[in-house]
Image (cartoon, rainbow, N blue to C red):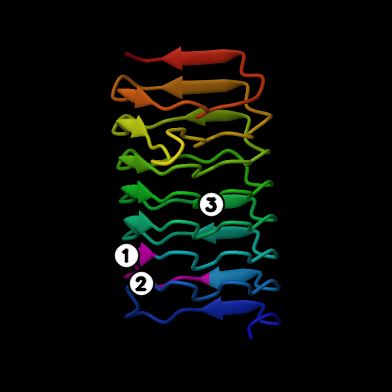
Amino acid sequence: NCESLKNITINNGVISVGKFAFYGCTSLEKVVLPSGLKTIDYQAFMDCKALKEITLPAGVKTIGDSAFFECGNLENVTFSEKLTQIGSKAFENCTKLNNVTFPDSLVSMGFAAFSNCKAFTKIVIPENVAELHYDSFTGLSYTFSGCSNVYAVQIPKSVIAIAGSAFSGDISDVYYTG
């Protein structure tokens, strides 16, 4: 039971935050991750409602599915410059998450990765992303679905496939850099 846990510092030497590691730690406000961290796994910080910001160390390459799902007060995420993959629903329902800057190293954004991030106003997809992944059952993406305040999207020439429902809202400007 970690409902009263407010702060955590993970020691150096840890390379992965495992599945469900801090799931449901609803009072968790501050997390300090070790410099050698490489992976944040499935639902590692899911439902950490008090968490407001997270800085990923330089070596983090993968954020697993639903890793920060339902972290409704999460406002700021600083991504690692080596990040290559953001899993499905990784930041879904992080309704206060502001615009983020994706690293150029990013190649994959999972199904509904940022769905319902209502504080987003613009989205710039990095050059190495080839597609916005979709759900194999529905065939729809929902990557940025429900981001109702987005007015501008920049799509690089590297993107060759965008599945249905990848975006929603009143988007007035779409820029394709191809």
Amino acid type of the residue tagged 1 in the rendering: Lys
Between 94 and 142, the one lying in front of the other is: 142
**What number is the disc on residue 38?**
1
Q: How many marks?
A: 3
Amino acid type of the residue tagged 2 in the rendering: Ser
Residue 19 in the image: x percent, y percent?
Answer: 43, 72
| Left or right: where 21 falls relative to 7 | left
Residue 6 in the image: x percent, y percent?
Answer: 67, 77
- Residue at the image position 51 percent from the left and 15 percent from the top: 174
Dot 3 or dot 1: first in sequence order is 1
The N terminus lies in which quarter of the figure?
bottom right
Provide the secondary structure element on which disc 2 rests.
strand
- Residue at the image position 31 percent from the left and 60 percent from the top: 59
- Estimate the spatial distance between the alpha carbons at disc 2 and disc 1, rounded to whole Å: 6 Å
**What number is the disc on residue 77?**
3
What segment carries the magenta color? 32-40
Amino acid type of the residue tagged 3 in the rendering: Val
- Estimate the spatial distance between the alpha carbons at disc 3 and disc 2, rounded to whole Å: 18 Å
Residue 114 in the image: x percent, y percent?
Answer: 54, 42
Magenta span contains residue 71:
no
| Left or right: where 162 falls relative to 51 | left
Provide the secondary structure element on which disc 1 rests.
loop
**What number is the disc on residue 16?**
2
